[in-house]
Amino acid sequence: MPTTPPAVLLTPDGSSLLEAVEAWLGSAGIPRELVRDPDALMARCLRGRPRILVIDARDGMELAEQACRRVKSDSYSAVVPTVVLCRFASGDMERAFAFGADEVLTEQTPPAEAVSRLNATLARSDRDVHVHPSTRLPGTDVIEACITSRMATDAPFAVCYADLDHFKEFNDRYGYHEGDRVIRVLARILHDVVKGLCGEGGFVGHIGGDDFIYIIPAGAVQAVCSEIVEVFDLLVPVQYSEADRRAGYFFGKDRRGQLHRVPLMTLSIGVVTNERRRFTSAWHVSELATEMKAYAKSLNGSVFSVDRRAEPVTPDAPRAGLQTPPSLRYR
């Protein structure tokens, strides 16, 4: 079983923390490690992200400011929630927030309030690190948790794996800035259509790059996927220059340096549901959705392809191959 990352406590003189903080760490089951200076703190953060940092600034803000600024200036350690302990609210609190503290507690903070604020700090941190920085959509951990929670109910649901075709060539031609903009356009299409048609019953996550997962009620597959494909095909041409848009392609080089025609981007969506099979795990769902996405990419144009295989698939049983069409293709 994975162990809980520790709380790293910067206490220059080794003094005890606020009583409320000590009690909170104990009740939360978070182990602790003590460091005495900013160098040791930074070295510890770079070896592995702590669960939380607590910097004791009650005997001086200078060392706390140096430590906090160093932690927050490095992209790896900056995401670690950092709490600064001060003696007084006036002046010290404003300064601590200014140099990067995520939360500030003082000796006057009521214990119950301190616990609530520490819990909220961790909750905000978990939410922020589990979303993609570009699209602000949930990442793989949340996607897996959502699939698992849907599997725990008897409601029919569909997991849809969306992937762009010819995106790499677009990125090579137009640059990563334009490529990132296309990713955000696709994220907005998926979010607006899924939420518009399914409301709170729909979920959209971002695996990374041009790969997305959305989860919807099984009965909404036709309406949701059809609209996504239609809106995507309407918007994608305007992502190109006028010359490329009019031609419907551009010339790009393959891995061997040979020129070939690259068509405009299309969208392939592989869909699996629990209507005809029983999923055994989130990993199992992911494997089947990946198969269906690959099958959709073998077809021309923007399409979604729904798995219609009814035979059970388990880790110990052979899986039906894709040499016979496993799905119905929709455009």
Image (cartoon, rainbow, N blue to C red):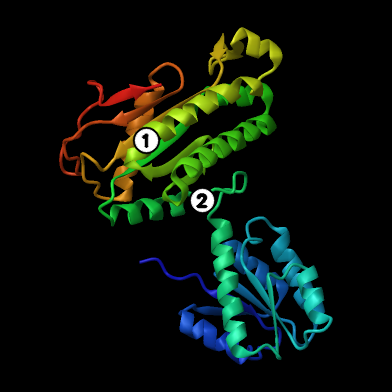
Which quadrant would the N terminus be assigned to in this image?
A: bottom left
109 relative to 327 in the view: left or right: right
Front-most of residues 276 and 78: 276
Where's residue 94, x and y in %? 81, 75
* Camera-nearest residue between 203 and 109: 203
First along the sequence among labels 1 and 2: 2
Residue 129 lies in quadrant: bottom right
Frontmost of labels 1 and 2 is: 1
Disc 2: CA contacts within 10 A as few (<14), some (14-19) or many (>=20): many
Give the image location of residue 148, x and y in percent: 34, 54
Q: Assess whether mark 2 and mark 1 are in contact (beta carbons under 8 angstroms).
A: no
Instruction: Give the spatial CA distance, label 1 vs label 2.
Output: 21 Å
Q: Secondary structure at mark 1?
A: helix
Residue displayed at 73% across by 71% down: 67
Q: What residue does disc 1 label?
A: 221
> Which residue is rendered at x = 53% and y = 84% of the image?
24
At x 48%, y 27%, the residue is 229
Residue 46 vs 200, above or below: the answer is: below
Residue 104 point in image, percent of width and height: 70, 78
Residue 216 visible in rendering: yes
Q: Nearer the viewer, residue 37 or 248?
A: 248
Q: Say whether residue 78 is left or right of residue 156.
A: right
Question: Quarter of the image containing the C terminus?
Answer: top left
Residue at which label 2 appears: 138
Disc 1 crowd rating (10 Å Cα; few below 14, some 14-19, many 20+) is: many
The part of the image, by quadrant, that contains residue 33 is bottom right
The tag on residue 5 is: none
Tell me what residue is drawn at x 53 percent, y 55 percent.
130
